[in-house]
Image (spheres, helix red, strand yellow):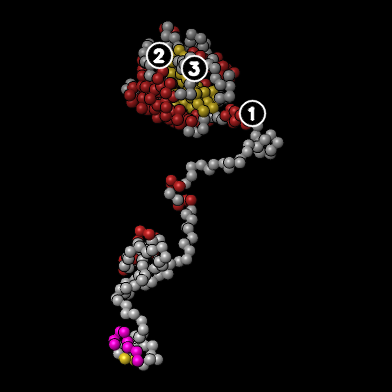
């Protein structure tokens, strides 16, 4: 007879299971929670296993020959550990963090410079010559202001000083390389000589800041009674060293009619002929457009691109300065459009 180790009942010798409790007669009693299975500590678990551990019990780390599985609590679900880690996800470069996107792509370590026999070879000297040709073919303009600096013109002097940077930026924003210069004049017939303003010894500069510094030194004074020596000043402007490859642009600014004759100029045709000889591309005059004595300036517009602008009215030079600033901005756009 066999005695059940679980309940003590007597069973036949051939029985393997107790006829009273149904348990295996020869198996050892198992205490509750004596489970020879362990769980990997959370710090050592793969990331995909950590999500559902809230209902799991963590047991001491296993020995080297132990099997790592989850021990679920009641109502929890056992998940099989995948035999292979999931394939990595490739993040498109456009979605990568900025720090991971390379600033430049390095050339392969075995890259070589094409030799002279290669179809991809570019001769450095030919490249430089081509570059220079592109630069030379860019639109350029030499702009020479002929500015009346008599006593009534302080507003216009201030406007040229204050607006020259914006004026130059307006032109250069249209891909025109500009140089600027200035001639100041008053009345030569009373001994007030005209002057070419120099920038580091040159009559033109491409630096608006340098131009502004020199214009800031000008003062409106003298002139006496009208008229003034404007045509002599234009003639002096025509003798300046313009870049042969640039558009020659002259901007006359005055609130007075011209002396005819003057110290040098005897008549308006003399100036017109000189302008034709040196091929002045653009001529602009800022004047009192309603003054009949100043209408003679319009003769200088014949045969070339140009416009006449109203200089403004009144004796308040501050108000005229603001008006002239707006005129300069419009003039900058006009010069950019007309430069070819």
The numbered mark at residue 207 is none
Q: Which residue is mark 1?
A: 125
Disc 1, SS? helix
Q: Quick check: is 2 in the magenta stretch?
A: yes
Q: Read off the magenta span.
A: 1-8
Q: Which-is-in-front pick, marks 1 and 2?
A: 1
Residue 67 against residue 14 in the figure, above or below: above
**Disc 3 residue crowd, few under 14, some 14–19, many 20+, Cα 10 Å:** some
Q: Which quarter of the figure has residue 16?
A: bottom left
Horizontal and vertical percent position of residue 316: 32, 22
Q: Quick check: is 139 in the magenta stretch?
A: no
First in residue order: circle 3 vs circle 1? 1
Residue appearing at x 36%, y 81% in the figure:
27
Q: Which residue is mark 2?
A: 226
Measure how far apart labels 1 and 2 are at the Cα level: 59 Å
Residue 122 against residue 95 in the figure, above or below: above
Between 306 and 243, the one lying in front of the other is 243
Figure quadrant of the C terminus: top right
Disc 2, SS? loop
Q: Which residue is mark 3?
A: 203
Residue appearing at x 59%, y 28% in the figure:
132
């Amino acid at each position: 007879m066999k005695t059940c180790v679980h309940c003590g009942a007597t069973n036949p010798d051939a029985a393997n299971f107790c006829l009273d409790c149904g348990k295996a007669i020869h198996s050892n009693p198992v205490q509750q929670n004596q489970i020879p299975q362990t769980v990997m500590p959370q710090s050592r678990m793969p990331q995909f296993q950590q999500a559902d551990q809230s209902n799991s019990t963590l047991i001491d780390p296993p020995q080297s020959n132990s099997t790592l599985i989850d021990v679920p609590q009641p109502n929890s679900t056992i998940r099989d550990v995948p035999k292979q880690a999931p394939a990595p996800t490739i993040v498109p470069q456009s979605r990568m963090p900025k720090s991971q996107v390379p600033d430049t792509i390095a050339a392969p370590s075995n890259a070589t410079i094409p030799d002279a026999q290669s179809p991809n070879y570019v001769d450095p000297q030919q490249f430089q010559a081509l570059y220079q040709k592109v630069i030379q073919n860019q639109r350029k303009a030499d702009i020479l202001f002929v500015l009346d600096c008599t006593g009534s013109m302080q507003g216009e002097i201030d406007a040229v000083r204050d607006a020259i940077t914006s004026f130059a930026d307006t032109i250069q924003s249209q891909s025109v390389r500009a140089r600027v210069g200035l001639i100041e004049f008053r009345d030569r017939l009373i001994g007030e000589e005209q002057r070419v303003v120099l920038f580091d010894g040159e009559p033109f500069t491409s630096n608006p800041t340098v131009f502004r510094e020199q214009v800031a030194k000008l003062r409106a004074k003298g002139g006496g009674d009208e008229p003034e020596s404007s045509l002599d000043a234009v003639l002096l402007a025509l003798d300046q060293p313009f870049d042969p490859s640039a558009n020659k642009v002259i901007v006359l600014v005055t609130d007075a009619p011209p002396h005819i004759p003057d110290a040098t100029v005897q008549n308006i045709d003399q100036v017109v002929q000189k302008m034709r000889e040196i091929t002045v591309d653009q001529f602009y005059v800022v004047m009192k457009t309603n003054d009949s004595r100043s209408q003679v300036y319009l003769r200088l517009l014949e045969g070339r691109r140009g416009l006449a602008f109203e200089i403004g009215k009144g004796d308040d030079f501050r108000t005229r300065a603001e008006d002239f600033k707006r005129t300069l901005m419009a003039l900058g756009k006009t010069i950019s459009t007309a430069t070819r």
